Image (cartoon, grey):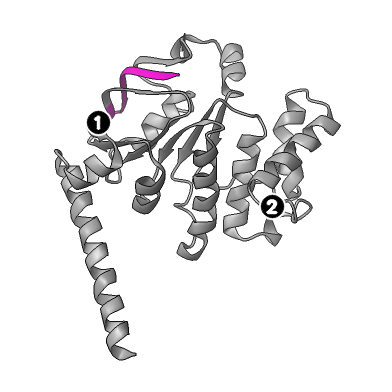
Amino acid sequence: MLKINNLYKHFGSLVAVNNLSMSVNKGETVVIMGPSGCGKSTAIRAINRLIEPDGGSIFLDGTDVTLLSEEELRGVRKRIGFVFQQFNLIGRLTAVENVMLGLVMDGLKREEAYEKSLAALQKVGLDQVVDHRPSQLSGGQQQRVGIARALAYEPDLMLWDEPTASLDPMLVREVLVVMEELARVRETTMLVVTHEIAFALHVADRIVLMDKGSIVESGAPHRVFVNPVSDVGRRYKELIEYQLNTSSRTLAGERIAS
């Protein structure tokens, strides 16, 4: 479905993405991970040309996105849902109005746009707050409105750029639950940039590890995190082991105290 060949992007003297090649199959959930500044977000934003690549090709169902005109690109972007770190909601609009705005601007009748938006909000568990404005919603709820806004287009491909990065840790789980359900039912192909290890272990069909603009390792979660071959993979393995050991010691202490 998605095939990236030799993607390259630089900002001045900084090479952000260095000849990256990868593919994502229809219905697959692929998670991109790596240290901050490794090029994850730049790579995913280049797919629908929110960032213009300096080299390489990006094929969506056989069409090279990098060669499209602005008008052609607008059509392709309707097939690609994008969930950002920031919520980017309009404060004066209700949740359902935020979701339906893009549909109406694209020419869909308001009645049909409203029905699609209600269905999308229901998918993310917000059917009880459709008339609430962003100021009346928690951060997690606002991000779920952003997810519904992307889902309303019924996209073939969903791109997620660290969707929990701006959330309080207490609110992260409600967004991850929505993402896990979408991955489970496989209604859309998903490419996710995240630091959430538990989510990646539980949901991803494949993990792609990046470092310094390049892919350094790729494979099933149980292989990448259990028998890593890259330095980044080994650091993730150590982090997982540390978290497990810390949890075990905490549980042991609680049993002794009780």
Residue found 23% across the figure and 50% down from its top = 236
Question: Would residue 243 be found to the left or right of residue 141 on screen?
Answer: left
Say few, some or many: other residues with alpha carbon within 10 Å of mark 1 (under 14 / 14 to 19 / 20 or more): many
Residue found 38% across the figure and 40% down from its top = 204
Residue found 38% across the figure and 32% down from its top = 42
- Residues 72 and 244: in front is 244
Query: Callout 1, which amino acid?
Result: Ile
| Residue marked by disc 1 | 215
* Residue ranking furthest to the right: 111
Callouts 2 and 1 close, C-beta under 8 Å? no
Location of residue 120 in the rendering, given as x and y in whole percent from the top left corner: 68, 40
Image quadrant occupied by the N terminus: top left
Instruction: State whether residue 3 is above or below residue 246.
Output: above
| Residue marked by disc 2 | 126
Residue found 41% across the figure and 44% down from its top = 203
Give the extent of the magenta segment. 1-17
Query: Callout 2, which amino acid?
Result: Leu
N-term mark: 2 or 1: 2
Location of residue 180 in the rendering, given as x and y in whole percent from the top left corner: 49, 46
Image quarter of residue 152: top right
Image quarter of residue 51: top left
Question: Would residue 125 be found to the left or right of residue 111 on screen?
Answer: left
What label does residue 82 carry, if any? none
Instruction: State whether residue 258 is above or below residue 138.
Output: below
Q: Main secondary structure of the magenta part?
A: strand
Please tell me whether mark 1 sits on a helix, a strand or a loop.
strand
